[in-house]
Amino acid sequence: MQAQIRAADKIVVMAQGRVVEHGPHDELVGRNWLYAQLHKLQFKG
């Protein structure tokens, strides 16, 4: 599944019904915000 996420052209992150982040995987991980935290929880922990 991780490879599918990395291959996506754009990922949209929502919190409380609102879009809070969007962009490709590497950019979102680099921002170190919500997507990065969720990614670490899912794939690193």
Image (cartoon, helix red, strand yellow):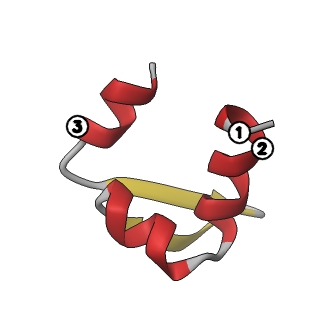
- View extreme (front): residue: 44
Of callouts 1 and 3, the N-terminal one:
3
Which picture quadrant has residue 14? bottom right
Which picture quadrant has residue 20? bottom right
Residue at x-position 69% and y-position 49%: 40
In the rendered structure, the answer to whether residue 8 lies left or right of residue 13 reads left
Residue 43: image location, x then y, percent? 65, 34
- View extreme (bottom): residue: 31
Please tell me whether residue 5 is drawn above or below residue 16 in the rendered image. Answer: above
Q: Estimate how packed mark 1 is, as few (under 14), some (14 to 19) or many (20 or more) residues with alpha carbons within 10 Å.
A: few
Amino acid type shown at disc 3: Ala
Residue at x-position 43% and y-position 57%: 12
In the rendered structure, the answer to whether residue 7 lies left or right of residue 14 reads left
How far apart marks 2 and 3 lie (CA) works out to: 19 Å
Could you say whether the residue bearing mark 2 is in a helix, strand or loop? helix
- Residue under label 2: 41
Residue at x-position 35% and y-position 71%: 27
- Residue under label 1: 44
Judge depth for marks 2 and 1 and give the one in front.
1
Q: Estimate how packed mark 2 is, as few (under 14), some (14 to 19) or many (20 or more) residues with alpha carbons within 10 Å.
A: few
Q: Estimate how packed mark 3 is, as few (under 14), some (14 to 19) or many (20 or more) residues with alpha carbons within 10 Å.
A: few
Could you say whether the residue bearing mark 3 is in a helix, strand or loop? helix
- Residue under label 3: 7
Residue 29: image location, x then y, percent? 49, 65
Of callouts 2 and 3, the N-terminal one:
3
Image quadrant occupied by the C terminus: top right
Amino acid type shown at disc 2: Leu
Depth order, front residue of 29/11: 29
